[in-house]
Amino acid sequence: MTTEARIAGTPAILEVSGLDVDFWVDGQWYPAAVDLEYDVKAGEILAIVGESGSGKSSSSMALLGLTPPNGRVAGSAKLLGRELIGMSGTALRRVRGRDIAVIFQEPMTALNPVYSIGFQIVETLRTHFDMSPSEAKARAIELLDLVEMPTPELTFDKYPHQLSGGQRQRAMIAMSVSCDPKLLIADEPTTALDVTVQAEILELLRNLRDRLDSAIVLITHDMGVVADLADKVIVMKDGRIVESGSVEQIFHAPTETYTQQLLASVPHLRLEGEVSTALQTDMEGGVQPYLSFRNVAIEYPKRGRIPAFRAAENIDIDVYPGEIVGLVGESGSGKTTLGRAAVGLLPVAEGELLVGGHNLAAMSSRQLRAARKEIGIVFQDPGSSLNPRFPIGQSIGEPLMLATGTKGDKLDRVVESLLDQVELPRSFRNRYPHELSGGQRQRVGIARALALRPKLLVADEPTSALDVSVQARFLVLLQELQREMGFACLFVSHDLAVVDQLADRIVVMHRGHIVEQGSSDQILRSPQEAYTQRLLAAVPLPDPAAQRSRREERIRLLGTEEADGSAAS
C-alpha cells in the first residue's frame, strides 16, 4: 500500500485554522505567523520549510503555549478535536511530553545543565507513567541505545556539557520519543548530526511513525531531509504559507518563485568534472601554515568519578593563510575538540600546536590573551554562546571594546557594518538573543567572530542553523571576506556538500584519529577509506525519488556488511 493510500482514510491528529502569532517589540506588534491553515493525519509527516525568521518554529511552539511573555496567539489548533489554544497551564502540562513531544532546535538550552541525561529521561517517564526507578532507568538506557548513543550505560550518568553537540541532540530525541507521543514536533532534529547518524535518526523517526501511527511536524531547512522523510510540505515566508503540496509536487513542480529559489540554493556534492567554487590557495613560495597540529594529543582530565578521556591523538594538520580546511566526521569524532584546542580552550597533552608560528601550549596567560585577538571562533550552539542578558549589539561589539578600546559612535558604526555583512537588520542590535530565531542567532555569532578581523577563524558548524538560502549567501560572504582579509580557516562541519563548496582540503576524523586527508576532489570523489565511503553514502539527496533509491541502497549495503560480519565471526 502506498503512503498516500494509507494516510487517505486516517483521522487528522492536528488541525490548525486561522493561527496568528504576534510579538510585542519596541512598542508595536510584529506578526510571526499569519492565518496559518494545515492539518496532519495519523502516520503522516508534514515538513515546514522556509528561511530563518519565517515563523516556522514560532507557530509550532505556539501550539503548546511555549511563546515568550511578549507573544500572543489567536486562532485554532486542535489535537484529536481538543482545542490547544487557550488551554490552561495545568492541562497543557499533561499534554506536553505524552500526547505532544518536541525535539528542540538547540539541545544545550533545552536540556537542564544541572541534571544528568539519565535523570532527565527518567523524570519524563515517571511523570507520565507508573514506573519504578529501576524500570525507568532500564527504559532510559534502552532509549539511548535506540538513538545510537555510544556507551548508553555511561552516558546515562553524564551531564549535557560532557556530550558533543550531536550526542546532546540524540539525548534530546531519546527524551522526546520516550512516551510514544501522538504528535511529534521535530524542530531541526538533525541540525547538529553528522550524515551517518542523521540517516539513522531519520530511520528512527520513520519507524516511530510506522509503529505508533504518530503524526510528525518536521521543521527544517535541510531539503535533503525533507526529500527523505516528508509526505507533505508547507513553504513559509514572512509568517505566511506561500505554497503547499505533496513532497513530489514541491520538488518537481514548484509554482512559486520563492520555492524555486529555495530549491536552487540547496548545496549538493559536485559531480565529477564540475568546477569548485572554493578558493584555490597557492602553497608554494615558502608560505608557512598559520595553524599547525604536530602529532597532537588532547585529553579531558579526570573529574570526580569520571576518568580522564583522550579525545584525539596523532593529529597532524596544517592550515595556511587564505586556505579553508574542512574537518569532517561523525559526532564525537573529535572535530570540535580540535577547534577548541586551536583557540586555547583545551590544553594539549602531547605534541605541538602552533598558531602564527608560536607554540600555544608554551604561552603564558598574557601571551595567550594577545594571541586570541587574532583568532575568531563561531561556536556550534548559538543559544548557549550568546549572553542572554546582553542585547545583540553589545554581544557583537564586546570583543572590539575589550581588545581595542573602541567605544561610542565608532563602535556603533562597526556593529552596524557587521550586521549588514551577515544580512541582519540594524534594528536587531537592540534585541536580545531569545527574540531571534536559531538561524538569526547563528549569524550574530558569525558577526562577533569577524569583529576583530582575525588571522585565523575556527568555524564550528557555522551553517548548521542556517536555512539554505542564507547558507548559500553566507558561504559566498565567507569566501569574499577571506579574499579580502586572507585569514586561515578551520571549518568544522558534518555537511559534506557545504564543505565541498568551500574547502580547499578536507580532513576526515573518526574516534579521535585522522582517517584520511587530501584535496576536496580526492576525499569526496575518490575516497580510499571505507569509513569515508560510508559517510558519502549517507548524504541525503534533495530529490524524493533519488533519495528513496539511495536509502534502499544504503539499507542493502548495511545488511550486506552485517551478514559478512556474522559470517566472519
Image (tube, rainbow, N blue to C red):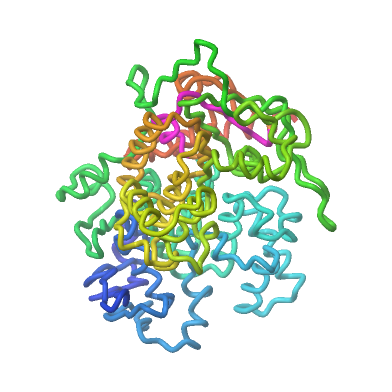
x then y, percent, for residue 430? 37, 66
Task: Identify the residue at horizontal 34%, vertical 59% (top origin).
Answer: 46
Query: Is 368 left or right of 499, judged from the image as shown?
Result: right
In the rendered view, would you say 194 is above or below 486? below
- Does the rendering let one see residue 555? no
Depth check: give the residue in front, 459 or 334.
Answer: 459
Task: Identify the residue at horizontal 65%, vertical 69% (top origin).
Answer: 120
Q: Is 252 colored magenta in this rendering?
A: no
Most extreme residue toward the top is 285
- Does the rendering let one see residue 502? yes
x then y, percent, for residue 107? 55, 60
Query: Is 310 left or right of 73, judged from the image as shown?
Result: right
Task: Identify the residue at horizontal 51%, vertical 49% (top origin).
Answer: 192
Q: Is 509 colored magenta in this rendering?
A: yes
Res 365 → quadrant: top right
Depth check: give the residue in front, 233 or 310.
Answer: 310
Q: Which residues are magenta?
A: 495-512
Q: Quadrant of the C terminus?
A: top right
In the rendered view, would you say 181 is above or below 469? below
Task: Identify the residue at horizontal 22%, vertical 57% (top origin).
Answer: 244
x then y, percent, for residue 3? 34, 53
Depth check: give the residue in front, 358 or 174.
Answer: 358
